Amino acid sequence: MGIFDEMAKYGHEQLHFFQHRGTKLKAIVAIHDTTLGPALGGCRMRPYETEEDALFDVLRLSRGMTYKCGVADVDNGGGKSVIIGDPNTDKSPEMFRAFGRFVGSLGGRFYTGTDMGTTPMDFVHASREAQHGGFVGLPEEYGGSGNTAIPTALGVYQGIRATAKVLWGHEDLTGKRFAVQGVGKVGALTVERLVAAGAQVYITDVYQPFVDALVAKVPPVQMLGVVAPDEIYGLDVDMFVPCALGAIVNDETIPQFKCKAIVGSANNQLLDMEKHGKMLHEKGILYAPDYLVNAGGLIQVADELKGYVEARVMAKTNSIYEMLLQVYALSTEQNIPTWLAADRLVEERIARVEDLKSMFSL
Ligand code: NAD
């Protein structure tokens, strides 16, 4: 299939290929949809086996960003960039400066920041060369907004509250039982919020120091136990809270679940969106779409483009509660899986903004 056919398939607006011989930079930027504003999306660096793999990834991920920005109600469209190379061996400050010159030349149509294989420091180098911006998520000492895990964990907590409201008619989490997978940056903060709200938790992580640090903080009466990584799925809990890996909702785990709902920060939780979303729907397990509940981090970096205000980020992140209630209501009303309900709400939101932008205004 040709490149224009690929772009037409999901309505991508623009595709850029950049190369710089001196630093061996090979990068692709995909802009999917800018109805809501300039495109925003991370920059992933990976040793893609083929150029087609890189192209496929950037097209798929940039489209996902349109939905993520739409659901988070930020004034940005979907975009993404990929750099073809091994982040451990091929990186140099100059490579990112070259990348900065290219992204800067897009004149503010596209903003990017860290993703798999890239760090905030890479974009310190890049932003030195970009006169018209183009970079977000720099370290705080370089003007960035800091740790995105804080709003992300707040969003997960609001997702849990909204889910509790649907399950029990109230948000009181006292005595409710949660299984948290991964207690890194987001998972640990989520556990702290749950415990403060009176809930009880099981936890698991493959990195023992994180487990030990959390066990020392949680009152023993609220710590139901530390379990092995593969035991987390079958526990008798109210909610499963995945904060580690993607693709953990699949043919093997769904039959094990005893939980009433899945609400967590991990990206791409459903191995196969259509198949596994439907299986959860049929099993009566509420699934909070990951790209909605983990939108706090995106809300924070998008806010940098307006001049970061922490209180605004937290207020916007709190609204994940309302949006998730709308998703659940639409899912029930139309008897469709929640991920599809979320997609439909975003598409309606984008169509409404498109309509009002048809009116001329300076
Ligand atoms: P993190 O790396 O700090 O934490 C992830 C934790 O998961 C680590 O402690 C790791 O040891 C653990 N882990 C890895 N494999 C595991 C396994 N098999 N079983 C149990 N634990 C395992 O990452 P984070 O920033 O806390 O992000 C957590 C998830 O949320 C990731 O999927 C990330 O993509 C997603 N997310 C994070 C943010 C953010 O702002 N940090 C925003 C959106 C989405």
Image (spheres, rainbow, N blue to C red):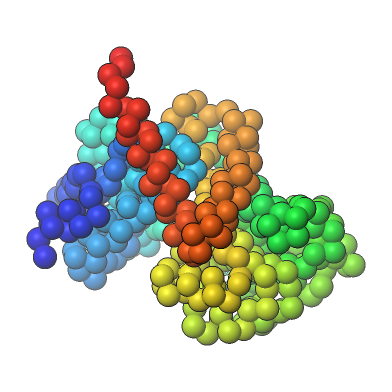
Residue 323 is situated, as x and y percent measured from the top left of the image, at 56, 46
Residue at the far top: name it. 362
Instruction: In the displayed orientation, state which residue is furthest to the left.
Output: 2
User: Is residue 306 in view?
Assistant: yes
Q: Is residue 93 visible?
A: no
In which quadrant of this rendering is ligand 1 seen? bottom right
Residue drawn at point x = 19 percent, y = 65 percent: 52
Q: Nearer the viewer, residue 342 or 28?
A: 342
Residue 274 found in image quarter: bottom left
**Is the residue 199 above or below the residue 233 in the image?**
above
Q: Is residue 140 above or below residue 346?
A: above
Q: Nearer the viewer, residue 160 or 230?
A: 160
The residue that appears at 32% across and 32% down in the rendered structure is 355
Labels in figure, total: 0
Q: Residue furthest front?
A: 333
Q: In the shown orientation, is residue 117 left or right of residue 223?
A: left
Left/right of residue 97 with respect to residue 170 in the rendered view: left
How far across and how far down the image is residue 153, in percent? 64, 51
Q: What residue appears at the point 32 percent right and 52 percent down from the top-left corner?
A: 63
Q: Could you say which is closer to the camera, residue 27 or residue 31? A: 31
Q: Which quarter of the image is occupied by the C terminus?
A: top left
Quadrant where the N terminus lies?
Answer: bottom left
Q: Residue at x 34, y 56 (%)?
A: 61
Q: Position of residue 208 (x, y in %)?
A: 68, 72
Between residues 291 and 143, which one lies in front from this camera angle?
A: 291
Q: Where's residue 132, x and y in %?
A: 30, 27
Work out whether 80 lies above or below 210.
Answer: above
- Against 259, is 19 above or below? above
